[in-house]
Image (spheres, grey):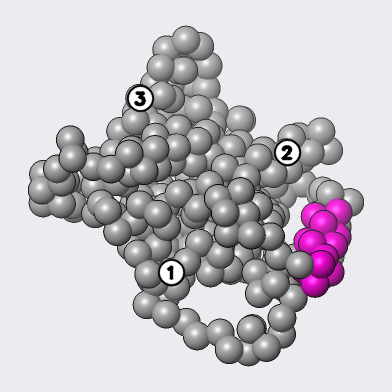
Amino acid sequence: MTRTDALRGHAAMGLFSALVAGSFSLGVRAANLIDPAAITVARFVIAAGVLAGIAALVPGRGRPRALLESPWRYLLLGAAFAGYFVLMFEGLKTAPAVAASAVFTLTPVMAAGFAWLLLRQRMTGHLALALALGGAGALWVIFRGDPAALLRLEIGRGEAIYVMGCALHALYTPLVRKLNRGEGPLISSLGTLVAGGMLTAVWGWGALTATAWGALPAIVWITIFYVAVFASAFSTMLVQYAALRLPAAKVMAYTYLTPLWVIGLEAALGQGLPGVMVLPGIVAILGALALLLKSDEPARGPVRAA
């Protein structure tokens, strides 16, 4: 891995953080209007169709035959990815968008733990400092620079459910590297989405058939297509791309940017902007990302061709 490869991985995750933020702002407005399993199946079907279309336009790229090599790998990846989204929408039934993005910032530390278990990737002092700084900055922004608000934090049912989903998301990142057999991000993402959609359809068949698809409000369809195209198809490829170039903890460190995007989106939707008290948190987040960019040693663990 060269420094150029690492910088491309960082760029991919920067875009990922922005795309994921839209899921929170839209998801919180649609979560109570459709079953989590039904919306997850719909988004996976649409996302897989998008990626299949792209793959058809660029035949021969990314070793499509690799999908037939130990297909059980995609059942594991698909189960982790689908479980995350089902639990996310279940949690967003009661958890507000900003609170959910706060929970999302727990994934880097969990990813570092799973990466040690699966890949024996060790967290250096440099990386630990960056993660701690980014986490502190994210929490400062989430609670709008009010320590009293942080002390009053109460973990609700929605946040607790979403913690379990974030654990699956954190597990997914090192699994990508562990199970890769030479597939590129496009082909690997397609296999993950197809497997995840099939597993979710089997598990949530009752909810899927009980949903009155023709009577769903416009906000639900907007959410479905946004999360399918931008927060599933494209974001899956971005994570797959970055996970083959960066350690898992660095990949998930970009979740610290998500609360900034969420606050901006919520402001655009009429929720208002936070005051200048959040500026120290923003500076801390940017400082953490600067630390991550400063040193990009090759990640440990098995790495195959992207």
In this rendering, the label closer to the viewer, 3 or 1: 1
Quick one: 256 or 217, which is closer to the camera?
A: 217
Amino acid bearing label 2: Ala
Amino acid bearing label 1: Ala
Res 273 seen here = yes
Q: Quadrant of the C terminus?
A: top right
**Residue furthest toward the right?**
294
Where residue 99 appears, x then y in whole percent?
Answer: 53, 69
Dot 3 falls on a residue whose secondary structure is: helix
Amino acid bearing label 3: Gly
Answer few, some or many: residues within 10 Å of disc 3's Cα (few below 14, many 20 plus, some between 14 and 19).
some
Report which residue position mark 2 lands on. Answer: 11
Dot 2 falls on a residue whose secondary structure is: helix
Cα distance, mark 3 to mark 2? Answer: 25 Å
- Asked if residue 159 lies in the magenta stretch, the reply is no
Report which residue position mark 1 lands on. Answer: 95
103 to the left or right of 193: right
Answer few, some or many: residues within 10 Å of disc 2's Cα (few below 14, many 20 plus, some between 14 and 19).
some
Q: Earlier in the sequence, mark 1 or mark 2?
A: 2
- Residue at x 36% of width, y 43% of height: 219
Report which residue position mark 3 lands on. Answer: 49
- Residue at x 35% of width, y 25% of height: 49
Q: Earlier in the sequence, mark 3 or mark 2?
A: 2
Quick one: 278 or 58, which is closer to the camera?
A: 278
Dot 1 falls on a residue whose secondary structure is: loop
Start-end of magenta stretch: 276-290
Residue 118, located in which quarter of the rendered image?
bottom right
Residue 114, located in which quarter of the rendered image?
bottom right
